Amino acid sequence: MRLSTVLGIKRTASTSARMVTLGMILFGLLSLGFGVVTFYGLSTGTFVISMSEEPARRGIQLSEDRAFSNNGTSRLYADPQDDYEEATYSYLEIEQATQVDGMYENTNADYMAYTFYLRNSGNEMVDLTYNLSIVEVTKGLDEYIRLLIIIDDLEGNVTETMFMKPDDEVKYYPPDYPVAKHFISDTLISNERISMFQVGQVRKITIFMWIEGYDTHPGMERGSIKVDMKFNLLSGN
């Protein structure tokens, strides 16, 4: 954690603290049972979620609003800010962000939050998995990144899962800090399941991504990271 921080994370810009740039691509592609979600941020700032032929044939649809006012689409776009400083779990405005469809706009928020919807408009129940993978990283930024995936089935059931790279040394987090799942490998963050996705059901998915201030240090340099989130039809579907 940066030495300038006392009992928390420094929230304001400082000329003495180096800005860490969080490069993100969000690109979703469902093809032959596979979906890809990636985060952009350095130069383009564009967030894309797309769906291709096979899952569309199975009736899996995407939308940036619950009503699916566009009748379901194969592509979504959003534009996160380019530069982020440090944050931590307690700084996430989870209730507010999950109530905003699409990109959560808050100039004081040093994290990315994006909400979209997944609907089964087909004729059969399916089981899905999603993989989060690191495609590209510079300056070891993966050591400090946290991802939080919130999935709401809109029937009263909400799951919240945090992911982090295992610490190389003992670190001390606040008592109320959630227990995170460790990255599976240097490139694979997670392999999670969305089970029994019934016909007509909708999942509301919110993705948070931030640079964890309890892990950063004064010597950090600017870094970037590209992460894919892949939705797959479970084998046998």
Image (cartoon, rainbow, N blue to C red):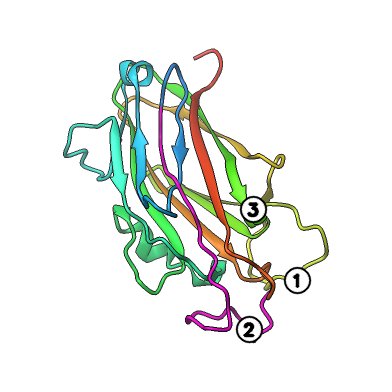
Of the image marks 2 and 1, the number of the one nearer the N terminus? 2
CA gap, disc 1 to disc 3? 19 Å
- The answer to whether mark 2 and mark 1 are in CB contact below 8 A is no
Amino acid type indicated by mark 1: Tyr
Q: Nearer the viewer, residue 132 or 217?
A: 217
Name the side, left or right, on which 210 lies relative to 44. right
Q: Is residue 5 magenta?
A: yes
Amino acid type indicated by mark 2: Thr
Residue at x-position 64% and y-position 53%: 142
**Quarter of the image that includes the N terminus:** bottom right
Per the image, label 2 sits on a secondary structure element best described as loop
Residue at x-position 68% and y-position 67%: 215
Q: Position of residue 96 (x, y in %)?
A: 35, 65
- For residue 172, the mark is 1
Per the image, label 3 sits on a secondary structure element best described as helix
Instruction: Residue under label 3, please give it.
Output: 142
Q: Is residue 222 above or below residue 126?
A: below
Residue 107 shows in the view:
yes
Q: Residue at the far right: name it.
A: 169
Instruction: Residue under label 2, please give it.
Output: 5
Q: Nearer the viewer, residue 60 or 81?
A: 81
